[in-house]
Image: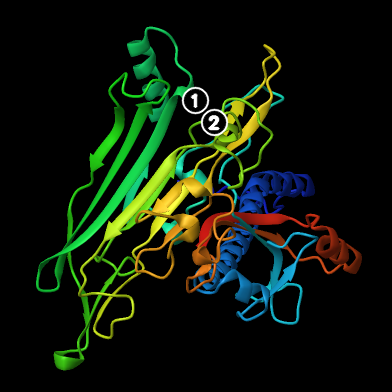
Amino acid sequence: MSLFIRKGKLNNSGFSLVEVLVAIVILAIISLPVLSTFSNAARINAKARRTENANTAINNIVEEARIVSLDNLADGNGKYNYQTLGTSNNTYLVADKGQQYFTGVDGEKYFIRTKFNSNPYNSNANAAAGNKKTNNDINSAGLSVYADITASNSYVYRDDSADTEAIKYFSDLNKTAVSRTDISKTIDVTISIKEKSSNHFTQDISVNVTYKYIKEAGKYPDYTARSMDMVTWEFPAHVTGSGTSAVYTISGKIKDNAKNMYIFYTPYQGEAVSGKSYTDSVTEAEMTSGSVATERININYDYPSTYSLTSADHVIKDVDVYLFEMEKVVDTSTVVGSPVYKKMGTNISNVYINGAKAISSVNGTTPVTVYSNIEKWGEINSALTKHINNKDVLYQMTVDVWLWRDVKDEIDDIVDSNTEPTAEKITTLTTTKED
């Protein structure tokens, strides 16, 4: 028996050039989306890092602005240089000392503009679109994490629809529509801190909003739209030192201590046109028919007599009230379909602090200071300027950040005319500054 073995030729020819090219093309097609993903991720990470660094820069500026007066910032007495932009006294280029750019944490350069605005903190009505609405959300006041009104050390009162409710109430009693000028409005705020036991305290805050029908005094019962006693807050004095060196402190700036008060309200009267601005020089008749609201705002407070602002061992300070005038825009036209909008404001002469007019009170020299964005607040009378930061004004602070472009002509134009840079805008933050 014979064994036959068939010998075959091995195929060692490999891939042809065409096959290799096809494989490369397929691999490229598959790889492109992956490479694009990596590229996009790198760009996104770079942008996120740039935004994070810009926010860090904003944080540094805001933190300094919280503790340094606006005058000192503008005079160069802070960490950064504040250069006035254009003709505005309250818009600045914030930069490193001796420079026109701000250096970030990674050495990147930014153009940073900071505005301080003491006007009502709301969007304007769009007259062209016939839009009477204004943005009166609490957050529209520009409060950010740097001034958190929802924190445990704050009371918040908001006046929303009470005016409409009051008009309906008196119109129903009168059997016919009544005018706003037939009704007066008074807001009473009372803040009381009492000693419950040795260096342990309670704090009570009440808000009452009362409407009276003044066209015929006494004809109808008053309408109390808001009568609220906020939950009693109990807290111990903050203690430093011990024994005869112990210092007891009550302060709205200490955690779990006294609370501050935020009041958000909308000006009441003023549906007609008088052409007057928000000053204290208008007559009562002009106020009831013009652009200045007539409501009276009473802010009263009391605290233990054993504590004072200047005491060496029993100190009370920084128990503050923030009086936010929300923007009101009304249709002042008598022509149907042709709206004309006019802003309303509160007369500073109608604000009273512990029974005295705000413009002649000792506001700022006692433990309770009233900050406000009401027109002329801190300007009418020097009594309102007696505070550690000189003015007792609440500013809306807006910080805008752009990438830096070292182009002299553009920089000069920005500084001289307050124009916006052409470089990429990175971020914006709005908060508040008390001054």
Rendered residue at 57%/25% (across/down): 271
Q: Name the residue nearer the viewer: 304 or 232.
A: 304
- Mark 2: few, some, or many residues within 10 Å (few <14, many ≥20)? many
Residue 414 coordinates in the image, percent (x, y)? 82, 61
Give above or below for 409 relative to 224: below
Q: Residues within 10 Å of mark 1 (few under 14, many from 20)?
A: some
Residue 104 makes an appearance in the image: no
Work out whether 163 lies above or below 325: above
* Residue 199 picture quarter: bottom left
Q: Residue at x 61, y 64 (%)?
A: 54
- Answer yes or no: do the residues labelled 2 and 1 have beta carbons within 8 Å? yes
For badge 1, the amino acid type reads Thr
- The residue drawn where x is 73% and y is 49% is 20
Given residues 186 and 90, the one toward you in this image is 186
Relative image position of residue 77 (x, y in whole percent): 62, 81
**Residue sitting at x 34%, y 48%:** 156
Name the residue tied to disc 1.
181
79 relative to 204, above or below: below
Q: Quadrant of residue 216?
A: top left
Q: Give coordinates of residue 140: x percent, y percent.
A: 51, 44
Q: Secondary structure at mark 1?
A: helix
Residue 352 locus on image (x, y percent): 41, 51
Q: Which residue is mark 2?
A: 288
Q: From mark 2 to mark 1, how far is it between C-alphas? A: 6 Å
Residue 33 appears in the figure: yes
Kind of residue sitting beneath label 2 = Thr
